Image: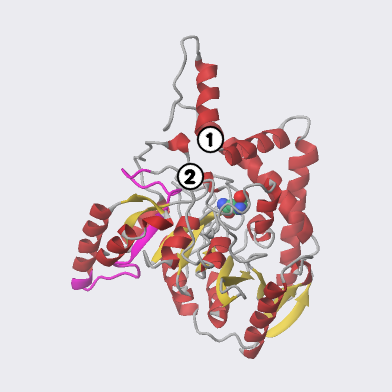
Amino acid sequence: TESCLAAIDGADALNAWCAKTPEIALAQAKAADARIKAGDAPGMCGIPLGIKDLFCTRGVATQAASRILAGFKPEYESTVTQNLWDAGAVMLGKVSMDEFAMGSSTETACYGPAVNPWKIDDRQLTPGGSSGGSAAAVAADLCLAATGTDTGGSIRQPAAFTGIVGIKPTYGRVSRWGVVAFASSLDQAGPMTKTVRDAAIMLQAMASVDPKDSTSAEIPVPDFEAALTGDIRGKKIGIPREYRIEGMPEEIGKLWDEGTAMLRDAGAEIVDISLPHTKYALPAYYVIAPAEASSNLARYDGVRYGYRAKLGAGDGIVEMYEKTRAEGFGPEVQRRIMIGTYVLSAGFYDAYYNRARRVRALIKRDFEQVFAAGVDAILTPATPSSAFGLGEMADASPVEMYLNDVFTVTVNLAGLPGISVPVGLDAKGLPMGLQLIGRPWGEGDLLNHALVLE
Ligand code: GLN
């Protein structure tokens, strides 16, 4: 813990941390020492972590990287972080992210962008997003692991951009209680770690059946580490043809082939599969996620939390709401609120929101059919490129940023577990990741497949 705290102080240039909590860290580390001495050392005992700014931590600033939550210190602890503290983990501080987890580059954070520890010459790169602070902190060895959340790829894409492991569990495996909501039917928290084994241990600690979250599934949490045998002989791996998208860099295709060969060499059977509704996933996601976000973000009104705009003489309550939300939310969040409000409005609800929900059901059915045919895991690229430069997308249309999520959103729409594993470097020397998608509640098996790619 002490060496991580020192490393964090020397790494301000990465802008990964938005709050440092050395007193809490040292007290938790001492308590962990005592537990180890007493012979009671659970899996995460004494492990120093970064906590994404989206998790409510009692008495510690929790801002979702938004100006509108300035000064908010929750009175309560999220279930996930409480589970981690119960398992002996140590909080070094909070790590940055895209505002309200909306983005793929951590550039929408009110703290300014986080920086990828990987560089090309002197060019600064994004660590991805939205869990970019988590990814940068883990990749730069400022903590042993970090929590992330994934609504459409926010654990897996930054993991791929920084050469670390990130798993999004099955929807309902990890409690959402105390995690600031973005899109409630898609959000899921998960670990971001240096190795697959670390991911198994940390997921074990994070996951629980939680009566405080009505979408927490009443399915016991198995021993994920015990599933890591490295034996995948006779397993069936599906390679979905729809993921070979036009314009995909050759290197990504090559990496995908290499990953396929690694699984085949380990004794798995490789089969071509089709997930025919894949091409509708991104548009469906960018209707459903903003719709849910516009509803979730209605609570930020300048009364209950954080920031309130300064008011003029004649201003009443309506002006207070308007000014607070106009000043408190950044441009990407405002865009999502407007899209979401539009697709939910009476005149357009059927044309957009209901249609997107029907598409979502078809995407889910594609996966169900493939798994019913005996496929154990699906291998795809994690991202359509390696890390891009900070500011590089500044003049691009928002849709270009959304294209980052093309391989990851299907998993959230279907509620499945997905993991990103670092598999190689591209010609520029930057890390690239592959994604494995597993059966619902099959995180143990999924992690075991990932072990072979590591
Ligand atoms: N990049 C996606 C978005 O902006 C995913 C975000 C996430 O998973 N939190 O919506």
Amino acid type indicated by mark 2: Val
* Residue on which the image places disc 2: 180
- Mark 2 CB within 8 Å of ligand 1: no
Q: Main secondary structure of the magenta part?
A: loop
At a point 57% along the width and 77% down the height, the residue shown is 423
- The part of the chain drawn in magenta is 36-61
The foreground one among 114 and 309 is: 114
In this view, 153 is above or below 313: below
Q: Residue at x 42, y 61 (%)?
A: 137
Relative to 145, residue 280 above or below: above
- Residue type at mark 1 is Phe
On the image, numbered disc 1 is attached to which residue? Answer: 329
Q: Report crowding for label 2: few under 14, some 14 to 19, many 20 or more residues within 10 A (C-alpha).
A: many
Q: CA distance from mark 1 to mark 2?
A: 15 Å
In the rendered image of this protein, does residue 231 appear above or below residue 222? below
Q: Residue furthest top?
A: 314
One can see residue 384 in this view = yes
Where's the N terminus, which quadrant?
bottom left
* 284 versus 263 height, above or below: above
Q: Position of residue 407 (x, y in %)?
A: 68, 63
Q: Secondary structure at mark 1?
A: loop
Residue 186 appears anywhere in the view: no
> Residue 165 appears at what percent x and percent y?
51, 69
Q: Counting other residues with Cα less than 10 Å from the Cα at mark 1, is it few (<14), some (14-19), or many (20 or more)?
A: many
Out of 407 and 392, give the one closest to the viewer.
392
Q: Residue at 50% of width from left, 13% of height from top?
A: 315
Residue 47 magenta-drawn? yes
Name the residue at the front extreme. Answer: 122
Please state if 324 lies on the left or on the right of 371 as rendered. Answer: left
In what element is the residue under mark 2? loop
